[in-house]
Image (cartoon, helix red, strand yellow):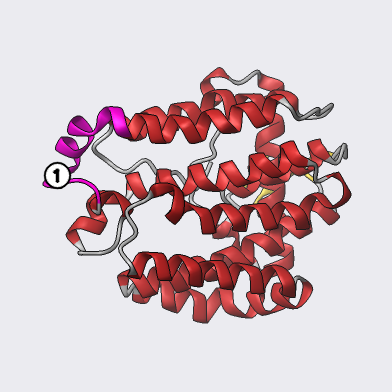
Amino acid sequence: MFGYVIPDKLNMFMKDYYGYRGFYCGLCKSIGRRCGQLMRINTTYDMTFLNVLAHAVLDVELPMKMETCILNAVQKKLVAQDDEITQKVVDISTILAHYKCVDDFKDEKSLSKKMADAMVIRRHYKKAKKRYPDLDEFINQRYADLAKLEKEKCSSPDRVAHPFAEIMTKIGEVVFGDKYDEPVKDMMYNMGKWVYICDAVDDVDDDFKKKGYNVFLQNYQYTDRAAFLKDNQEVLKFILMSAYNAILGDFDKIQVKKYEGILTNIIWYGMLNNTEDLLRRCEKCKKIRI
């Protein structure tokens, strides 16, 4: 994933902040146990959100304990304990990390991403692929669909975001199982659409300089990021806020008994802040680690 589904930590209740941080640290440790210490760099806000959402929708309380961390061996903090749901999220995160590296190398010829995949990610990806072959094949096909649209220089944000939105929908099917009802399914789809569009807006300057594909470069004259945001403010706001408001509508239909405060903060405040940041900031907004 891309690092846009973030909390608004300044406006979080303390219990929700410590709970969220516990989920983040627990996911990080679970990745370390399942995939090795180097893979812990793959811990992201987005997959932490998915883990919180999964436990909330499935109504599963995740135990937490006071533990130290590899980055701080002295001070203890709340850390979520491992369970089957978290392990599933780790495998999904590993599969996505592999395809992100492959896609980045294809688009940017990034040797660092190719080496990271070959030396660190791929062997863990192969294990995750064996556990979820159908999901892996689906993601592979949707990335192929996305590559085709990019090759055609697709100028529709909705069309080009659709493959990644479908990937998120399929991930939801794997994670939520029998409790994967329409509101959750719709939110996963719209979340994927919003994330893809956020990434396109965030990367527009890099893609322009590298002469790479970006859906917004197909529609608008581009000279620099500041002018692009100023000249197309209303259109970009409509596109981003339409996807974001769809997520809000879906979330309102989902009944959760656990971790509602964390989810509400992320969806109502963190994601909205990130949407607004994308529309006004001339630097990139991607945030990967807590």
The image shows residue 228 at horizontal and vertical percentages of 19, 39
Residue type at mark 1 is Asp
Mark 1: give few (<14), some (14-19) or many (20+) Cα within 10 Å: few
Which residue corresponds to the image point at 67% horizontal and 79% vertical from the top-left? 126
Tell me the residue at 57%/72% (across/down). 141
Asked whether, in this view, residue 91 is left or right of residue 11, the answer is right
**Up-down relation of residue 25 to residue 121 (above or below):** above
Q: Is residue 78 visible?
A: no
- Is 215 situated above or below 241? below
Residue 216, image x, y percentages: 28, 49
On whether residue 85 falls in the magenta region, the answer is no
Residue 222's x, y, as percent?
15, 47
Q: Is residue 230 magenta?
A: yes
Residue 120 seen by the camera: yes
The quarter in which the N terminus is drawn is bottom right
Q: Give the total of numbered labels.
A: 1
Residue shown at the point (56%, 52%) measured from the top left: 165
Choose top left, top right, bottom left or bottom right for residue 276. top left
- Report the residue marked by disc 1: 224
In the rendered image, residue 151, in percent from the top left (x then y), is placed at 34, 70
| Residue 261 against residue 95 in the figure, above or below | above
**Left or right of 59 in this view: 261:** left
Q: Quadrant of residue 213?
A: bottom left
Nearer-the-camera pick, 125 or 227: 227
- Compare residues 63 and 278 and report the one nearer the observer: 278
| Residue at left offset 70%, top offset 59% | 90
- Region of the chain picked out in magenta, as a range: 219-235
- Dot 1: element: loop
